[in-house]
Image (spheres, rainbow, N blue to C red):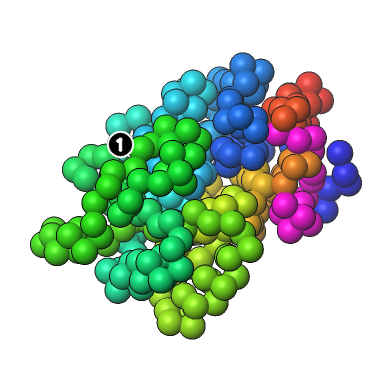
C-alpha cells in the first residue's frame, strides 16, 4: 500500500462504504469472490451501509447486491438513478434529452459505431440498439443484459418517451476523444461524457455523476462526507473520490484514479479492496 494523502478513517467513524463494481470489487472475470462477500457482510453486521455505485443497471447489478446483502440507496447508470433496494423505490432519476440522443445516433450512423441506450419500462429498464452486433454480444456476456433491436426513430415517436437514462458508445478508446469533442461542441452545457471502461463511452445529462448521486444519498441518510469511504478504478469514479472523506483505488485502476485516491491497494484480481477492509477490522482502525 502507498502512503495515504488523507488519514485512514477510524473504524467507528465510518457509516458507509461506496463501492464501484467492475474493476474495483469484481475480479476481471466479473466475479464477486466469496472472500469479498464475507468481508462486506461483516461491515453490514456492524451497521455500516454498503452503497453500490456503478454504471450498470439495477438488473445487471442485482446478483452482486443480493449476494452481499446490501440494502438501501444504490447508485446506478453512473448516477442517473438512485434507487432504494430491494424495494426498487426510485429516489432520484435524470434523463438524457431526445435532442442529444438524436445527435448520438447521427454520430453512430455516420461513423458506423455501435450505440445503445437504456430506457425505462414500467419498473424495469430496456437496453435498445438498432442492430445487434458483436459489441451487443460482448456487453451481454459481461453484464447479462441483452440488447433489443429497435429502430431509434420509432422509440422517439412514442408519446411516452422521456429520453434515455444513458446512452453508450461501445468503441475502441482511440475514438473516444473525437466523439467527446463533437458532442461537447454541440451540447457542452447539457451533457456529461466520460469513459467507464476501455471501450465504453457514456453520455448522460449534465451534472449527473456518481458523485452527484452520492451527495443525494448523504443528504438522504444525513451522513457527512468524512463518514464515507469511496472505492473506484475509472474516470467515472473520480467524482466519488471528491465527495467522500477518503478514497481508495486498486492497483489495476487508471493512473488518474490512483493519483486522486488517498490510498492504492492491491488489484481487484487479488481482492485488494476486501483485504484493505479486513485490515481495518483487524487493526480496529
**Residue 215 visible, this orientation:** no
Residue pictured at 41% horizontal, 75% vertical = 190
Residue 96 picture quarter: bottom left
Q: Which residues are magenta?
A: 254-268
Q: Where is 100 relative to 6, above or below?
A: below
Residue at the image position 43 percent from the left and 56 percent from the top: 114
Query: In percent of the image, x 75 and y 27: which residue is there?
Result: 270
Q: Is residue 148 left or right of residue 191?
A: left
**In the picture shown, does residue 224 fall above or below 284?**
below
Q: Is residue 44 magenta?
A: no
Whole-percent x, y for residue 11 in the image: 71, 33
Q: Quadrant of the C terminus?
A: top right
Quadrant where the N terminus lies? top right
According to the picture, the residue beneath numbered tag 1 turns out to be 88
Q: Secondary structure at mark 1?
A: loop
> Is 258 part of what is drawn in magenta?
yes
Residue 182, x across and y down, in percent: 49, 78
Q: Residue at x 65, y 33 (%)?
A: 28
Residue 36 screen position, x and y as percent = 64, 23
Give the number of marks. 1
Mark 1 crowdedness (10 Å alpha carbons): few <14, some 14-19, many ≥20: some
Q: Looking at the picture, tell me which residue is in the foreground, 284 or 187.
A: 187
In the rendered image, the residue lying farthest to the left is 159
Percent of width and height locating residue 50: 53, 34
- For this orientation, the residue located farthest to the bottom is 185
Foreground of the two, 153 or 48: 153
Viewer-closest of 209 and 194: 194
Which residue is at the front of the view, 33 or 239? 33
Left or right for 109, reference 255: left
Q: Is residue 256 visible?
A: yes
Amino acid at each position: 500500500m502507498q502512503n495515504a494523502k488523507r488519514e485512514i478513517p477510524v473504524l467507528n467513524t465510518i457509516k458507509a462504504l461506496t463501492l464501484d463494481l467492475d474493476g474495483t470489487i469484481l475480479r476481471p472475470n466479473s466475479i464477486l469472490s466469496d472472500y469479498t462477500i464475507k468481508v462486506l457482510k461483516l461491515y453490514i453486521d456492524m451497521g455500516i451501509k454498503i452503497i453500490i455505485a456503478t454504471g450498470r443497471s439495477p438488473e445487471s447489478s442485482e446478483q452482486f447486491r443480493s449476494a452481499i446483502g446490501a440494502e438501501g440507496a444504490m447508485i446506478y447508470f453512473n448516477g442517473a438513478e438512485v434507487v432504494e433496494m430491494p424495494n426498487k423505490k426510485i429516489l432520484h432519476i435524470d434523463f438524457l434529452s431526445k435532442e442529444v440522443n438524436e445527435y448520438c445516433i447521427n454520430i453512430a450512423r455516420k461513423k458506423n459505431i455501435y450505440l445503445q441506450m437504456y430506457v425505462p419500462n414500467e419498473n424495469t429498464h430496456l437496453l435498445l440498439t438498432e442492430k445487434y452486433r458483436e459489441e451487443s454480444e460482448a456487453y451481454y456476456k459481461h453484464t447479462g443484459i441483452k440488447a433489443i433491436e429497435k429502430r431509434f426513430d420509432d422509440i422517439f415517436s412514442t408519446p411516452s418517451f422521456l429520453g434515455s437514462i444513458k446512452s453508450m458508445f461501445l468503441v475502441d478508446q482511440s475514438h473516444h476523444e473525437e466523439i467527446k469533442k463533437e458532442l461537447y461542441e454541440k451540447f457542452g452545457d447539457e451533457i456529461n461524457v466520460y469513459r467507464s471502461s476501455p471501450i465504453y463511452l457514456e453520455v448522460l445529462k449534465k451534472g449527473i455523476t456518481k458523485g452527484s448521486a452520492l451527495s443525494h444519498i448523504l443528504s438522504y441518510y444525513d451522513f457527512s462526507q468524512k463518514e464515507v469511504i469511496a472505492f473506484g478504478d475509472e474516470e467515472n469514479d473520480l467524482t466519488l473520490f471528491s465527495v467522500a472523506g477518503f478514497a481508495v483505488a486498486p492497483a489495476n485502476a487508471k493512473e488518474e484514479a490512483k493519483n486522486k485516491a488517498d490510498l492504492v491497494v492491491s488489484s481487484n484480481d487479488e481482492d485488494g479492496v476486501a483485504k484493505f477492509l479486513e485490515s481495518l477490522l483487524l487493526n480496529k482502525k
